[in-house]
Image: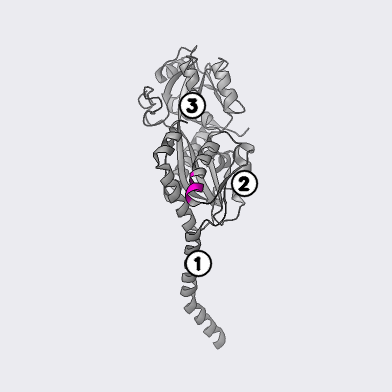
C-alpha cells in the first residue's frame, strides 16, 4: 500500500512537468510546420467555385510556406464523398477540407445515418461568401420583389423556379423567401446549376437564385432580368440592383459560403497557424480582385468566430428545411 501511495505521489509531482513537456513539443512542431505537403480536400469536381477558391489560396500558401498544398478533388454524393474522406484523415494538420455549407451543415440535416458529423471537424476559418442574385426570365412581367409577391399571391403556385437540386443553396434561398414573404412558388430541381440556368434562359422556368457570374452575360444580352441581391448591402458587381430589405422584405439575406475545416483532434496551434496565413492572403488586394471577378467577397474569421457562424447557419437552415418539408433526393 505504501509503495502505491509513493508511486501515486510521484505521478502527481511529475504530471505538471509532463504536461509542460508535451506542450513544448507541440509548440515546436507547430513552429516547424509544415514539413511535408499539405492536402486540401475539395468535395466537388475541378472547375467549380469551391475548386477555384481553394486553388487560389493554396497557390499563395505554397509560395509563402515553400511547401506544396495539393488540391484533392473528391466529388460525389453532393459533397458527401469528399467530406467523409476528410473526416477519416489523420488529425496531424496535413489534411484540410475546403467546402460549402453542403457537407458540414445541409447534408447532415437532410440525410440520416451519415458516417460523419459536424463533431468530426474543427472549423478553421470562413473564407469567402458569394451573394445570391434573384433573376427572372425577361419574358416574365416581373420587375421588382413587390411584383413577384403580388403575382404569387394573386395566383399561388403558378410561378416556378429552378435550382441545382433539392437542398441546394438556390433551393433553400427561395424557400426562405417564400416563408418570409408568405408566397407559394413551385420548385423545379435540376441536376446541377448549369442545366437550371440553361432552362431559365430558354424560358422553361421563370426564375432562379444563383451567384452572379453565370447570370451576367445573359443579363447583358437582355435574356434575364435581375430583381434583388440576397445580402444586407448592395453588391459592387451590380450596384444598381437593390437588396431584399430595400425591396420590402426586411431581414432577408442568403449567402453561399465557403470555409475551411480540419479534423477535430488536430492540435489547436496548427489550426491557429493556418487561420493566420489564410487571413493574410485574403487581405491581399490581388486576392480580393480575383475573388471579385467571381462575384465573391473575402470573409476571414477566427476559428471561434467561424464556429459561431456555422452553428447559426445550421439553426437557420434547420428551420427552413422543416418549414418547407425539404427531403434529400
Magenta range: 60-64
Q: How many marks?
A: 3
**Is residue 188 at least partly visible in the picture?**
no
Q: Which residue is mark 1?
A: 25
**Is residue 246 at least partly visible in the picture?**
yes
Q: Which residue is mark 3?
A: 213
Do callouts 3 and 1 mark residues in contact (Cβ within 8 Å)? Answer: no
Is 321 placed left or right of 45 in the picture?
Answer: left
Do callouts 3 and 2 mark residues in contact (Cβ within 8 Å)? Answer: no
Q: Secondary structure at mark 2?
A: helix
Picture disc at residue 91: none
Quadrant in the rendering for residue 111: top right
Q: Sequence order check: which comes first, mark 1 or mark 2?
A: 1
Q: Position of residue 161 (x, y in %)?
A: 53, 22
Name the chief secondary structure element in magenta: helix
Q: Which residue is mark 2?
A: 84
Q: Sequence order check: which comes first, mark 3 or mark 2?
A: 2
Amino acid at each position: 500500500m505504501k509503495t502505491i501511495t509513493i508511486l501515486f505521489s510521484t505521478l502527481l509531482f511529475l504530471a505538471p512537468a509532463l504536461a509542460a513537456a508535451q506542450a513544448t513539443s507541440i509548440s515546436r512542431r507547430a513552429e516547424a510546420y509544415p514539413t511535408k505537403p499539405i492536402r486540401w480536400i475539395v468535395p466537388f469536381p475541378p472547375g467549380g467555385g469551391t475548386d477555384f477558391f481553394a486553388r487560389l489560396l493554396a497557390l499563395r500558401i505554397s509560395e509563402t510556406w515553400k511547401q506544396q498544398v495539393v488540391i484533392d478533388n473528391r466529388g460525389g454524393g453532393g459533397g458527401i464523398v469528399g467530406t467523409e474522406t476528410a473526416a477519416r484523415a489523420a488529425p496531424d494538420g496535413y489534411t484540410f477540407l475546403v467546402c460549402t455549407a453542403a457537407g458540414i451543415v445541409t447534408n447532415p440535416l437532410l440525410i440520416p445515418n451519415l458516417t460523419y458529423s459536424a463533431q468530426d471537424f474543427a472549423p478553421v476559418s470562413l473564407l469567402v461568401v458569394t451573394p445570391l442574385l434573384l433573376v427572372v426570365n425577361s419574358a416574365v412581367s416581373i420587375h421588382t420583389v413587390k411584383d413577384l409577391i403580388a403575382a404569387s399571391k394573386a395566383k399561388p403556385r403558378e410561378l416556378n423556379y429552378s435550382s441545382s437540386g433539392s437542398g441546394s443553396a438556390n433551393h433553400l434561398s427561395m424557400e426562405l423567401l417564400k416563408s418570409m414573404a408568405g408566397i407559394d412558388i413551385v420548385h423545379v430541381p435540376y441536376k446541377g446549376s448549369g442545366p437550371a440556368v440553361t432552362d431559365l434562359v430558354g424560358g422553361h422556368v421563370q426564375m432562379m437564385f444563383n451567384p452572379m457570374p453565370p447570370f451576367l452575360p445573359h443579363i447583358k444580352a437582355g435574356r434575364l432580368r435581375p430583381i434583388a441581391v440576397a445580402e444586407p448591402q448592395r453588391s459592387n458587381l451590380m450596384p444598381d440592383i437593390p437588396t431584399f430589405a430595400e425591396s420590402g422584405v426586411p431581414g432577408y439575406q442568403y449567402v453561399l459560403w465557403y470555409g475551411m475545416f480540419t479534423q477535430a483532434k488536430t492540435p489547436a496551434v496548427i489550426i491557429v497557424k493556418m487561420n493566420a496565413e489564410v487571413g493574410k492572403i485574403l487581405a491581399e488586394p490581388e486576392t480580393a480582385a480575383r475573388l471579385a471577378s467571381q462575384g465573391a467577397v473575402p470573409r476571414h474569421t477566427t476559428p471561434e468566430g467561424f464556429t459561431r457562424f456555422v452553428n447559426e447557419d445550421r439553426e437557420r437552415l434547420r428551420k427552413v428545411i422543416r418549414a418547407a418539408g425539404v427531403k434529400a433526393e
